[in-house]
Image (tube, rainbow, N blue to C red):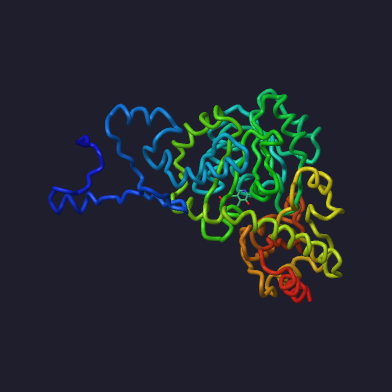
Amino acid sequence: MASNNAPSTGVGIRPSSRTVHVAVPPVEGSSPLGVPLYQGHTFTFPDADSMGAAFADPGGPFVYARYNNPTARALEDAVAGLEGGAAAIGSASGMGSITSTLWALLRPGDHVVAQNRLYGGTLGILGDLDQRWGVQVTRVAAGDPAAVEAAITPRTRVLFLETIANPTGEVVDLPALTAIAARNGVTAIVDNTFATPLLCRPIEHGADIVVHSATKYLGGHSDVIGGLAVFADDALHREVRGRTLEFGSVLDPASAWLAIRGLQTLGVRVPRQSENAQTLAERLAEHPAVDTVHYPGLPGHPSHATARALLTGGFGGVLSFDLAGGADAGRKFVNSVRLAALAPSLGDVRSLVMHPASTSHRNLDPEELAAAGIGPGLVRVSTGIEDVEDLWTDLEQALA
Ligand SMILES: *Cc1c(COP(=O)(O)O)cnc(C)c1O
């Protein structure tokens, strides 16, 4: 006899109860090949003791979907495995992962050292922590490890870096910087969105936490918003998890399911996108309408040597370039592409272009733009998986 609290099969109860107690078909003798989408947010237990044990163990049975969900955990485990981490926490977006992780680690009076060129949303939350929450933030040119070391104080709790920074393609010396963090008892967080675990696994280079916008390469098809934080060790995971549960930036199971579907082709998409970006960067560098191409795969790029040492199998799918004609030329270019789409975001299977000075960064004055590494005629390209000759034909006609 099953206990009173076992899921009902619906047999022997009244129709109005039956409509509620729909039997779940058991899966026996085989397993679904694709990860099932578990939309159910609450899990039932045979007795109070097993429910109590589940509450006490974050890695144990599922309880409630704000704590965890089987589909979300499948993605968390997959990305933790790819990054070489102990565990991961999924979030509703990359910013959910970044903000909840920073909130979990920091308290008033703490200090953060941040690479000066970071994703705009990350700079936003760091600015907010600094101006409203009593956390001091110092932004440094992280290409210079001595500058990072000099910025660290006894109150420094977090060092925040990006593997490949947007849109300049700066690649910093992760092993040197994480060693500085470790010597000073500082938690090193690395945003690995642009590199993906295929090109770089920051935990292997000393990072304590890796964050991702799964919205970009991991998902890869512009149909899912999600984020992940991967932890090098389980103690840190547990420390952060307790507080992210309160934050409520939960990875939706349907989003996790789409991200898993995307993740399964990451290994063919990213090498192809990197190859396409490398070819386009080389050809753009020879084009008379183009001043400078920013791509770490080019020998002339300031981070090229660091990128070669750190990245494996390519330099990523994002490149940018300055048009000699300035802001007007930038706007004209993005209006003229036909195959590439004019769109924000990146990492999609389709190639995307944008002109930051007239869109994402339009509120900055020329000095602020220069500080962000964005010239008035800078165009960013996120290369897709199309045939590179078709992409080049498109860029060439748009340049003309
Ligand atoms: C897009 C992005 C984020 C934020 O991710 P969302 O999923 O949009 O919240 C963070 N870091 C980098 C590098 C990004 O490109």
Residue sitting nearer the eye, 24 or 328: 24
Residue sitting nearer the eye, 266 or 122: 266
Residue 145 sits above or below residue 356 on the image: above
At x 67%, y 51%, the residue is 194
Residue 113 sits above or below residue 287 on the image: above
Residue 99 relative to residue 137: left or right: left
Q: How many marks?
A: 0
Residue sitting nearer the eye, 361 or 77: 77
Quarter of the image with the N terminus is: top left
At x 43%, y 44%, the residue is 70
Residue sitting nearer the eye, 196 or 303: 196
Residue 19 x/y as whole percent: 20, 54
At x 64%, y 49%, the residue is 193
Residue 245 sits above or below residue 33 on the image: above
Using the rendered image of the protein, determine whether residue 33 is visible from the camera's viewpoint. Answer: yes
Residue 127: quarter of image: top right
Residue 26 x/y as whole percent: 32, 48
At x 45%, y 47%, the residue is 71
Q: Residue furthest front?
A: 29
Residue 133 x/y as whole percent: 56, 34
Using the rendered image of the protein, determine whether residue 225 is visible from the camera's viewpoint. Answer: no
Quarter of the image with the C terminus is: bottom right
Residue 4 x/y as whole percent: 20, 36
